[in-house]
Image (tube, rainbow, N blue to C red):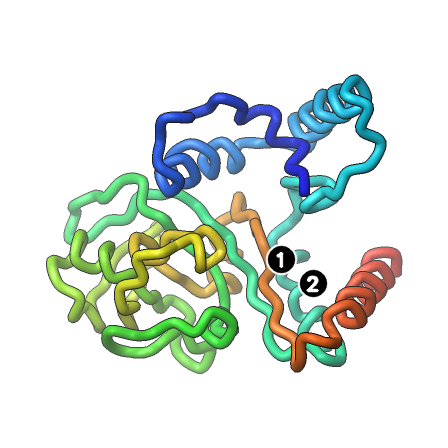
Amino acid sequence: HTHSAMTFSRSLADDYSLNDWLFKAIFPMEAKLTPDHIYWFNKLAYAEYIKGYKDFILEIREPYFEILDAKEEIEDIEQIKDVDGVKFASPIAISNSAITIANKAYQSTNIVATNDDLDDILGFHLKSGQFLDYSLRENVAVLGYNIAEQIFGTTEATARTFTYNNQQFMVVGVLDKINDPINFNGVDFDNSILINIKFASTFESSIQIQQINIRTETTDIVPTVISSINERLSKAKNG
């Protein structure tokens, strides 16, 4: 599949590891893209496809990196969860931001805004505490193993607090060590802080959902579910 709008990232940080390339180079630049940027980056890619005699591509997203209102995308997730055959649906919105603990700032911290379905989809193991839960307070967080050790000096960090974007969060859980982000949608959860995406959308205007993860009741109904999701979202947008 293609990532047409990523023409902007050619040769960018080629000497970085995958995690550093994503979190220190790509994601911070994605956060600054505007619809106008995306339009011209796509146009450049399409011109190159034609020059190279390519008349068909499979785009990962149409248009890739489309800038949408986060609240609208969260509403889309609720629509997806209502589709027959969908068992779980979970968004992932990543930002690279500063947090503070007792007036000490930790720059370039990986913040992953998501919902409680992510645990059911990816099957995390918890070192301590519990996963995100909408029945809890909105301003709760789950820490990756490494980030817990980095900012608190221990993985026994439940009930500790930190501040992100002028909002105080309480830690309710710490993930067990994963080590292999490739098998977890390319996200380095060991070095990330997970927060409630609905709450994040109320104070983080630039939040962008990079992916929506879906688990169906059975694998054989995936094509039917995809068709139903496209039809449901199309009606919602045009209605």
Examine the image and state in which quarter residue 219 appears.
bottom right
Judged left or right of residue 118, residue 83 is right
The three-letter code of the residue at mark 1 reads Lys
Residue corresponding to mark 2: 76
- Checking the image for residue 49, the label placed there is none
Q: Amino acid at mark 2?
A: Asp
Query: Which quarter of the image is occupied by the C terminus?
Result: bottom right
Judging by the rendered image, the residue that carries numbered circle 1 is 71
* Percent position of residue 152, x then y: 15, 58
| Distance Cα–Cα, label 2 vs label 1 | 9 Å
- Seen at 26% across and 64% down, the residue is 177
What residue appears at the point 49 percent right and 31 percent down from the top-left corner? 29
Q: In the displayed structure, does residue 232 sit left or right of residue 115?
A: right
Indicate the quadrant where residue 232 lies.
bottom right
Q: Against 54, is 60 above or below?
A: below
Residue 105: horizontal and vertical position, in percent? Answer: 21, 43
- Point out residue 82 in the picture as x, y percentages from the top left corner: 72, 77
Picture mark count: 2
* Crowdedness near tag 1: few (<14), some (14–19) or many (≥20) residues, C-alpha within 10 Å: some
Q: Which residue is nearer to you in this view: 130 or 167?
A: 130
Numbered disc 2: secondary structure: helix
Instruction: Find the residue positioned furthest to the front.
Output: 53
Q: Earlier in the sequence, mark 2 or mark 1?
A: 1
Q: Is residue 114 left or right of residue 81?
A: left
Q: Crowdedness of circle 2 by 10 Å Cα count: few (<14), some, many (20+)? A: some
102 left or right of 26 in image: left
Q: Quadrant of the N terminus?
A: top right
State which quadrant residue 40 falls in: top right
Of residues 119 and 152, the one drawn nearer to the viewer in this rendering: 119
Residue at the image point whose x is 29% and y is 61% from the top = 144
Outermost residue to the top: 51
